[in-house]
Image: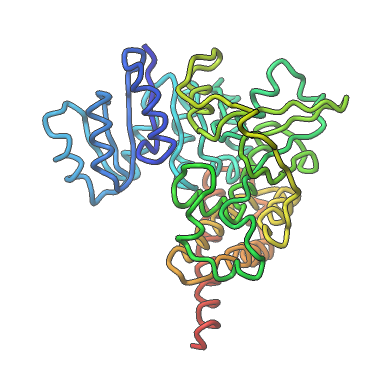
Amino acid sequence: MRRISILGATGSIGQSTIDLIARDPGAYAVVALTGGANITQLAADARRLGAQVAVTARDDLLEDLRAALAGSGVAVAAGRAALLEAAARPADWVMSCIVGAAGLEPGLAALQQGNVLALANKETLVCAGPLIMAEARARGATILPVDSEHSAIFQALLGEDISSVESVTLTASGGAFRDWPLADLARATPEQAATHPNWDMGQRITIDSASMFNKALEMIEARELFGLPPDRIDAVIHPESLVHALVTHVDGGTIAHLGAPDMRHAIGYALNWPDRAPLPVPRLDLAAAGALTFRAPDLARFPALRIARAVMARGGLAGAVMNAAKETALDAFLARRIGFTAMADTVSRVLDVAEAESGLIDAPFSLDNVLRADRFARKTARDDVASASRDNTGR
């Protein structure tokens, strides 16, 4: 029986993971489930799966979680320290799917156990890729990518020598606004941005898909996972979301990974690795799909991709700065303090300010330095948003 933990169990990836393990409960012993504010879901899943411990990241919700799990035998805890303790509990396989930079420290704590980390939290590698990969090597741990694009690349590379890879191409649906008139984007609302044409995802990642910041982060993630230089990592708009990634070799051959837009494939692949097992996902019907279309992304529409290339070229802790600025700008967009297109403007300006801060981006990769860069970028982004808000209101 495999011991597993799910960090971020109440989100869309966590729920899809639970859907898979609940189909074969005798195969798994659930060590820890963690979540945020959705106490009802967290408690229900902990009861159903017989988890050893359920943890909410919210200190103020401890009593709610305790009441929801009364009499169940499931231990309960709350807060950052409890989250890290749960992540560090011995387990054979840990799903890291906490949204955003908040997933970095719990993922690192799980990785230090030296087992398998199924990584759906791209920010972990965007912010601290060299640190995370070095830790995995030192601990003899395995990182399995769960982003659909990186899982696709990982699978396409099976049996191949990475030195034969000429390039990798990540596909992107283009999100909610891929066909909008460019002039209309500045007026897009959070509700409009949170509607995805193909994938069923959480609010924040869906909006990141509309802005292509999600793909920008994935380009950086691909560099860290596969060790490829930035000029060999590309992105292409693929509205059907059936081709998840392409790997082109030096002989001109390209291997594509295709499948229905269902995250349970990438999750299930990581869950069953190194084997394959039947999964309850739709099978691809190419005749029914008809045409597969591709087009180059418009950088005027998706400046996040240009920012990602600049960050990869800069190196150091620029990824941590970019991600923190992006998360803060997204918060401001959701609060209607800035417009949709202003998010990229804020991120660009924060990177410029960070560049001028001596020793920030070029600091050695350590957890303390990553967190320092993160804090600096969030404060700078909040100041930028406040300045932009004053300019817009005339106050």
Of residues 162 and 215, the one drawn nearer to the viewer in this rendering: 215
Residue placed farthest to the bottom in the image?
A: 394
The answer to whether 274 appears left or right of 168 in the picture is left
How is the model colour-coded? rainbow
Q: Give the image location of residue 264, x and y in percent.
A: 48, 29
Q: Quadrant of residue 67?
A: top left
Residue 169 in view here: yes
Q: Residue at x 27, y 31 (%)?
A: 45
Of residues 168 and 139, the one drawn nearer to the viewer in this rendering: 168
The vertical placement of 298 against 202, above or below, is below
Residue 357 in view here: no
Of residues 188 and 179, the one drawn nearer to the viewer in this rendering: 179
Q: Give the image location of residue 361, x and y in percent.
A: 65, 54
The vertical placement of 310 against 233, above or below, is below
The answer to whether 36 appears left or right of 338 in the picture is left
Looking at the rendered structure, the number of numbered marks drawn on it comes to: 0
Q: Residue at x 45, y 69 (%)?
A: 336
Q: Residue at x 58, y 25 (%)?
A: 138
Q: Give the image location of residue 390, x and y in percent.
A: 51, 82
The answer to whether 331 appears left or right of 380 in the picture is left
Q: Quadrant of residue 146?
A: top right
The answer to whether 295 appears left or right of 73 in the picture is right
The vertical placement of 100 against 88, above or below, is below
Q: Give the image location of residue 382, x and y in percent.
A: 50, 68
Residue placed farthest to the left in the image?
A: 71
Which quadrant: the N terminus? top left
Q: Residue at x 23, y 51 (%)?
A: 60
Q: Quadrant of residue 130?
A: top right
